Image: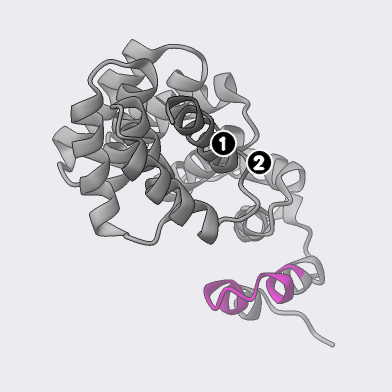
Protein backbone atom coordinates (compact mmCIF):
# COMPACT_ATOMS: atom_id res chain seq x y z
CA UNK A 1 0.00 0.00 0.00
CA UNK A 2 1.32 3.46 -0.92
CA UNK A 3 1.02 6.01 1.86
CA UNK A 4 0.23 9.65 1.14
CA UNK A 5 0.78 12.88 3.10
CA UNK A 6 -2.32 14.37 1.49
CA UNK A 7 -4.44 11.38 2.53
CA UNK A 8 -3.08 11.62 6.06
CA UNK A 9 -4.05 15.30 6.24
CA UNK A 10 -7.49 14.40 4.94
CA UNK A 11 -7.90 11.73 7.63
CA UNK A 12 -6.78 14.29 10.23
CA UNK A 13 -9.34 16.84 8.97
CA UNK A 14 -12.02 14.15 9.22
CA UNK A 15 -10.95 13.41 12.84
CA UNK A 16 -9.94 9.88 11.87
CA UNK A 17 -6.81 10.16 13.93
CA UNK A 18 -5.74 6.50 14.05
CA UNK A 19 -5.89 6.32 10.25
CA UNK A 20 -4.01 9.62 9.99
CA UNK A 21 -1.27 8.32 12.30
CA UNK A 22 -0.90 5.15 10.25
CA UNK A 23 -0.66 7.19 7.05
CA UNK A 24 1.99 9.60 8.39
CA UNK A 25 4.10 6.81 9.91
CA UNK A 26 3.96 4.85 6.66
CA UNK A 27 5.56 7.63 4.59
CA UNK A 28 9.03 6.98 3.22
CA UNK A 29 10.19 10.38 4.49
CA UNK A 30 10.56 10.50 8.26
CA UNK A 31 8.86 13.19 10.40
CA UNK A 32 12.28 14.32 11.66
CA UNK A 33 13.20 15.16 8.05
CA UNK A 34 10.08 17.10 7.09
CA UNK A 35 8.48 19.74 9.35
CA UNK A 36 5.08 19.40 7.63
CA UNK A 37 4.92 15.68 8.43
CA UNK A 38 6.17 16.41 11.96
CA UNK A 39 3.51 19.11 12.37
CA UNK A 40 0.57 16.92 11.41
CA UNK A 41 1.85 13.84 13.20
CA UNK A 42 2.48 15.93 16.32
CA UNK A 43 -1.10 17.23 16.20
CA UNK A 44 -2.37 13.70 15.59
CA UNK A 45 -0.49 12.33 18.61
CA UNK A 46 -1.94 15.21 20.66
CA UNK A 47 -5.49 14.32 19.62
CA UNK A 48 -4.79 10.70 20.58
CA UNK A 49 -3.35 11.89 23.94
CA UNK A 50 0.05 10.40 23.12
CA UNK A 51 1.70 13.49 24.51
CA UNK A 52 5.23 12.15 24.96
CA UNK A 53 5.38 11.37 21.25
CA UNK A 54 3.83 14.70 20.27
CA UNK A 55 6.19 17.01 22.19
CA UNK A 56 9.50 16.37 20.34
CA UNK A 57 7.78 16.64 16.95
CA UNK A 58 6.15 19.97 17.81
CA UNK A 59 9.47 21.28 19.18
CA UNK A 60 11.17 20.23 15.94
CA UNK A 61 8.65 22.24 13.92
CA UNK A 62 9.27 25.33 16.07
CA UNK A 63 13.02 25.05 15.47
CA UNK A 64 12.88 24.36 11.72
CA UNK A 65 9.76 26.01 10.28
CA UNK A 66 9.85 29.64 9.13
CA UNK A 67 6.09 30.16 8.91
CA UNK A 68 4.76 31.97 12.00
CA UNK A 69 1.41 30.21 11.71
CA UNK A 70 3.00 26.81 12.29
CA UNK A 71 5.18 28.16 15.10
CA UNK A 72 2.14 29.73 16.78
CA UNK A 73 0.12 26.54 16.48
CA UNK A 74 2.91 24.35 17.85
CA UNK A 75 3.63 26.65 20.80
CA UNK A 76 -0.08 26.81 21.60
CA UNK A 77 -0.47 23.03 21.47
CA UNK A 78 2.70 22.51 23.54
CA UNK A 79 1.36 24.92 26.12
CA UNK A 80 -1.93 23.02 26.27
CA UNK A 81 -0.11 19.67 26.56
CA UNK A 82 1.99 20.99 29.44
CA UNK A 83 -1.17 22.40 31.08
CA UNK A 84 -2.98 19.07 30.80
CA UNK A 85 0.00 17.22 32.28
CA UNK A 86 0.39 19.81 35.10
CA UNK A 87 3.80 21.00 33.86
CA UNK A 88 2.75 24.56 34.53
CA UNK A 89 6.16 26.24 34.33
CA UNK A 90 6.77 24.81 30.85
CA UNK A 91 3.25 25.81 29.83
CA UNK A 92 3.82 29.35 31.11
CA UNK A 93 7.01 29.59 29.04
CA UNK A 94 5.18 28.61 25.85
CA UNK A 95 2.34 31.08 26.36
CA UNK A 96 4.73 33.90 27.25
CA UNK A 97 6.73 33.13 24.10
CA UNK A 98 3.54 33.55 22.09
CA UNK A 99 2.94 36.96 23.63
CA UNK A 100 6.55 37.92 22.81
CA UNK A 101 5.80 36.98 19.21
CA UNK A 102 3.00 39.54 19.29
CA UNK A 103 0.19 36.99 19.51
CA UNK A 104 -2.10 38.46 22.15
CA UNK A 105 -5.37 36.60 21.90
CA UNK A 106 -8.07 35.72 24.44
CA UNK A 107 -7.07 32.07 24.14
CA UNK A 108 -3.42 32.79 24.99
CA UNK A 109 -4.24 35.00 27.97
CA UNK A 110 -6.86 32.54 29.26
CA UNK A 111 -4.40 29.65 29.02
CA UNK A 112 -1.66 31.69 30.69
CA UNK A 113 -4.05 32.71 33.46
CA UNK A 114 -4.90 29.06 34.10
CA UNK A 115 -1.28 27.92 34.43
CA UNK A 116 -0.34 30.89 36.60
CA UNK A 117 -3.17 30.00 38.96
CA UNK A 118 -1.95 26.39 38.88
CA UNK A 119 1.38 27.64 40.25
CA UNK A 120 -0.30 29.56 43.05
CA UNK A 121 0.03 32.93 41.30
CA UNK A 122 -3.62 33.89 41.71
CA UNK A 123 -3.20 37.64 41.29
CA UNK A 124 -1.24 37.29 38.03
CA UNK A 125 -3.67 34.67 36.78
CA UNK A 126 -6.64 36.95 37.42
CA UNK A 127 -4.97 39.82 35.54
CA UNK A 128 -4.39 37.58 32.51
CA UNK A 129 -8.00 36.40 32.52
CA UNK A 130 -9.20 40.01 32.71
CA UNK A 131 -6.99 40.79 29.69
CA UNK A 132 -8.59 37.90 27.81
CA UNK A 133 -12.02 39.41 28.49
CA UNK A 134 -10.85 42.81 27.23
CA UNK A 135 -10.10 41.15 23.89
CA UNK A 136 -13.32 39.11 23.92
CA UNK A 137 -15.86 40.00 26.66
CA UNK A 138 -17.96 36.87 26.17
CA UNK A 139 -15.08 34.39 25.94
CA UNK A 140 -16.57 31.50 27.90
CA UNK A 141 -13.32 29.84 29.02
CA UNK A 142 -12.04 33.09 30.52
CA UNK A 143 -15.41 33.80 32.18
CA UNK A 144 -15.46 30.31 33.69
CA UNK A 145 -11.84 30.35 34.87
CA UNK A 146 -12.08 33.82 36.38
CA UNK A 147 -15.34 32.93 38.12
CA UNK A 148 -13.87 29.72 39.48
CA UNK A 149 -10.82 31.52 40.89
CA UNK A 150 -13.04 34.17 42.49
CA UNK A 151 -15.11 31.41 44.11
CA UNK A 152 -12.20 29.22 45.16
CA UNK A 153 -10.24 32.11 46.65
CA UNK A 154 -13.32 33.69 48.24
CA UNK A 155 -12.62 36.97 46.44
CA UNK A 156 -16.14 37.75 45.22
CA UNK A 157 -18.48 34.77 45.26
CA UNK A 158 -21.50 36.68 43.90
CA UNK A 159 -19.47 37.91 40.92
CA UNK A 160 -18.13 34.36 40.52
CA UNK A 161 -21.67 33.01 40.07
CA UNK A 162 -22.49 35.77 37.57
CA UNK A 163 -19.36 35.16 35.46
CA UNK A 164 -19.79 31.40 35.33
CA UNK A 165 -23.49 31.69 34.47
CA UNK A 166 -22.48 33.71 31.40
CA UNK A 167 -20.01 30.98 30.40
CA UNK A 168 -22.52 28.19 31.05
CA UNK A 169 -25.18 29.95 28.99
CA UNK A 170 -22.99 29.56 25.88
CA UNK A 171 -22.61 25.79 26.46
CA UNK A 172 -25.32 24.56 28.86
CA UNK A 173 -24.24 20.92 28.84
CA UNK A 174 -20.54 21.51 29.50
CA UNK A 175 -19.70 19.61 32.72
CA UNK A 176 -16.75 21.90 33.44
CA UNK A 177 -19.02 24.95 33.52
CA UNK A 178 -21.70 23.10 35.48
CA UNK A 179 -19.10 22.05 38.05
CA UNK A 180 -17.73 25.59 38.33
CA UNK A 181 -21.23 27.02 38.75
CA UNK A 182 -22.13 24.46 41.39
CA UNK A 183 -18.91 25.17 43.27
CA UNK A 184 -19.47 28.93 43.05
CA UNK A 185 -22.99 28.52 44.48
CA UNK A 186 -21.51 26.42 47.29
CA UNK A 187 -18.92 29.07 48.07
CA UNK A 188 -21.72 31.64 48.03
CA UNK A 189 -23.66 29.61 50.60
CA UNK A 190 -26.36 28.28 48.27
CA UNK A 191 -26.29 24.53 48.90
CA UNK A 192 -29.50 23.79 46.99
CA UNK A 193 -28.30 25.16 43.64
CA UNK A 194 -24.78 23.89 44.33
CA UNK A 195 -26.04 20.33 44.70
CA UNK A 196 -28.28 20.58 41.61
CA UNK A 197 -25.54 21.81 39.28
CA UNK A 198 -22.87 19.47 40.62
CA UNK A 199 -25.19 16.50 40.13
CA UNK A 200 -25.84 17.59 36.55
CA UNK A 201 -22.09 17.85 35.99
CA UNK A 202 -21.43 14.40 37.45
CA UNK A 203 -24.25 12.84 35.42
CA UNK A 204 -22.42 14.01 32.28
CA UNK A 205 -18.85 13.32 33.45
CA UNK A 206 -19.36 10.31 35.70
CA UNK A 207 -15.67 9.50 36.18
CA UNK A 208 -14.53 13.05 37.01
CA UNK A 209 -12.95 12.91 40.48
CA UNK A 210 -12.91 16.67 41.02
CA UNK A 211 -16.65 17.01 40.39
CA UNK A 212 -17.32 14.02 42.67
CA UNK A 213 -15.19 15.61 45.42
CA UNK A 214 -17.08 18.90 45.08
CA UNK A 215 -20.44 17.16 45.33
CA UNK A 216 -19.30 15.11 48.32
CA UNK A 217 -18.26 18.32 50.10
CA UNK A 218 -21.66 19.92 49.46
CA UNK A 219 -23.56 16.83 50.65
CA UNK A 220 -21.45 16.65 53.81
CA UNK A 221 -22.14 20.30 54.61
CA UNK A 222 -25.85 19.80 53.88
CA UNK A 223 -25.91 16.86 56.30
CA UNK A 224 -24.20 18.90 59.01
CA UNK A 225 -26.80 21.64 58.66
CA UNK A 226 -29.83 19.35 58.76
Q: Is residue 121 above or below residue 57?
A: above
Query: Which quadrant holds the C terminus?
Result: top left
Magenta residue span: 9-21
Is 18 contained in the magenta span?
A: yes
Assign the N terminus to one quadrant of the image. Answer: bottom right
Residue visible at 39% across and 49% down in the picture: 197
Residue 206: image quadrant is: bottom right
4 relative position to 176: left or right: right
| Pointer 1 residue | 216
What's the residue at 35%, 26% (across, down)? 187
Can residue 139 be seen at all in this image of the molecule?
no
Q: Is residue 217 above or below residue 192?
A: above
Q: Is residue 188 above or below residue 120?
A: below
**Going by the picture, which residue comes out furthest to the front?**
226
85 sits left or right of 93 in the view: right
* Furthest residue in direction right, as rendered: 1
Q: Secondary structure at mark 1?
A: helix
Q: Which residue is label 2 attached to?
A: 60
The image position of residue 88, as x and y in percent, is 56, 23
Magenta stretch: includes residue 63: no
Amino acid sequence: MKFSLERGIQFFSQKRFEQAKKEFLGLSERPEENPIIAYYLGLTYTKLREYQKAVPLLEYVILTHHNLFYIFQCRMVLGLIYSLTAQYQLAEMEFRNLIKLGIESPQVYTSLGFVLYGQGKSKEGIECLKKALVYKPNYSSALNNLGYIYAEEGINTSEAVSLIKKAQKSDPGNPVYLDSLGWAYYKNGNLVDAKAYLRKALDIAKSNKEIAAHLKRVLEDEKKGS
